[in-house]
Image (spheres, rainbow, N blue to C red):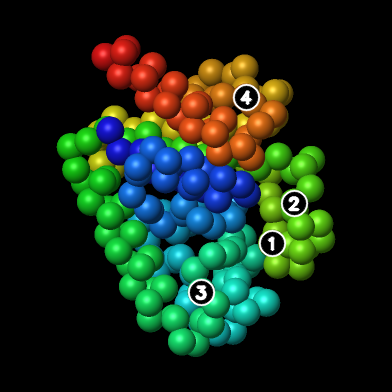
């Protein structure tokens, strides 16, 4: 089973948990991402970041034109490191495509954005990120579309701090509620428990 991050507003906490699980890096691991950015850029590097100096913010962040995602940890000097960063994400998209076209099942994981929670550092993201209300129905359509397109078993684990959605049931989506969704040890345990449950149900 391939374990692949679809990021989130707390995507870096998820990436740390996946690193502890010895998982390779994929395109969305270390980013802040909205739902629409994931869906519009999925397995398509041309709809990802523009890798253009015009979108560099505060020397170390890269934005997208519509402020729906932020690259946080990939460079200190974009002009000098641009080709290196582009090459790294090209490899990650290639890895994603290889996973999608392999015979392995896939478990995507997403940290669901809770708009009631303020981002830290306070006010830092106000002018560079436009958050959006996520929709489980849209995620379900996304998963079902890719199950059909790649003819394989694909599921999505959503980790959320919103208890109003965690009790709902969807096809191929697993919802887990926790107040500690920014704690990579808690995320690690949730992922491991989910993997164990899926494997034991076969």
Tag 4 residue: 177
Please name the residue shown 62% across and 49% down the image: 9
Q: Nearer the viewer, mark 1 or mark 3?
A: 3
Direction from residue 187 to residue 120 in the image, left or right: right
Q: Is residue 141 visible?
A: no
Crowding at label 3, few (<14), some or many (≥20) Cα neighbours within 10 Å?
Answer: some
Mark closest to the chain's N terminus, 4 or 1: 1
Q: Position of residue 185 (x, y in %)?
A: 54, 34
What is the residue that sits farthest to the bottom in this orientation?
79
Badge 1 marks a residue whose secondary structure is loop
- Name the residue carrying label 1: 129
Tags 4 and 1 touching, CB below 8 Å: no
Marks 2/4: CA–CA distance? 19 Å
Q: Marks 4/1: CA distance?
A: 25 Å
- Chain-order first, disc 2 or disc 4: 2
Residue at which label 3 appears: 75
Q: Which residue sits at x=36%, y=19%?
A: 196
Marks 1 and 2, how far apart in space?
Answer: 10 Å
- Residue pushed farthest left? 103
Disc nearest the viewer among 4 and 1:
4
**Structural crowding at the residue carrying mark 2, measured as other residues with C-alpha within 10 Å and reported as few (<14), some (14–19) or many (≥20):** few
């Amino acid at each position: 089973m391939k374990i692949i991050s679809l990021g989130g507003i707390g995507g870096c906490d998820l990436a740390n948990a996946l690193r502890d699980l010895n998982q390779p890096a994929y395109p969305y691991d270390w980013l802040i991402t909205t739902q629409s950015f994931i869906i519009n850029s999925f397995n398509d590097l041309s709809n990802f970041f523009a890798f253009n100096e015009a979108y560099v913010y505060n020397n170390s962040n890269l934005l997208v034109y519509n402020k729906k995602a932020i690259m946080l940890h990939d460079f200190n000097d974009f002009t000098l490191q641009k080709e290196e960063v582009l090459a790294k994400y090209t490899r990650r998209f290639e890895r994603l495509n290889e996973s999608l076209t392999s015979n392995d099942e896939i478990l995507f994981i997403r940290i669901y954005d809770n708009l009631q929670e303020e981002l830290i550092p306070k006010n830092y993201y106000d002018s560079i990120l436009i958050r959006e209300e996520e929709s489980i129905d849209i995620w379900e359509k996304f998963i079902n579309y890719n199950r059909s397109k790649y003819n394989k078993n694909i599921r999505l684990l959503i980790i959320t701090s919103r208890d109003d959605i965690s009790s709902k049931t969807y096809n191929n989506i697993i919802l887990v509620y926790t107040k500690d969704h920014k704690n990579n040890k808690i995320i690690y345990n949730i992922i491991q428990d989910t993997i164990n449950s899926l494997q034991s149900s076969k």
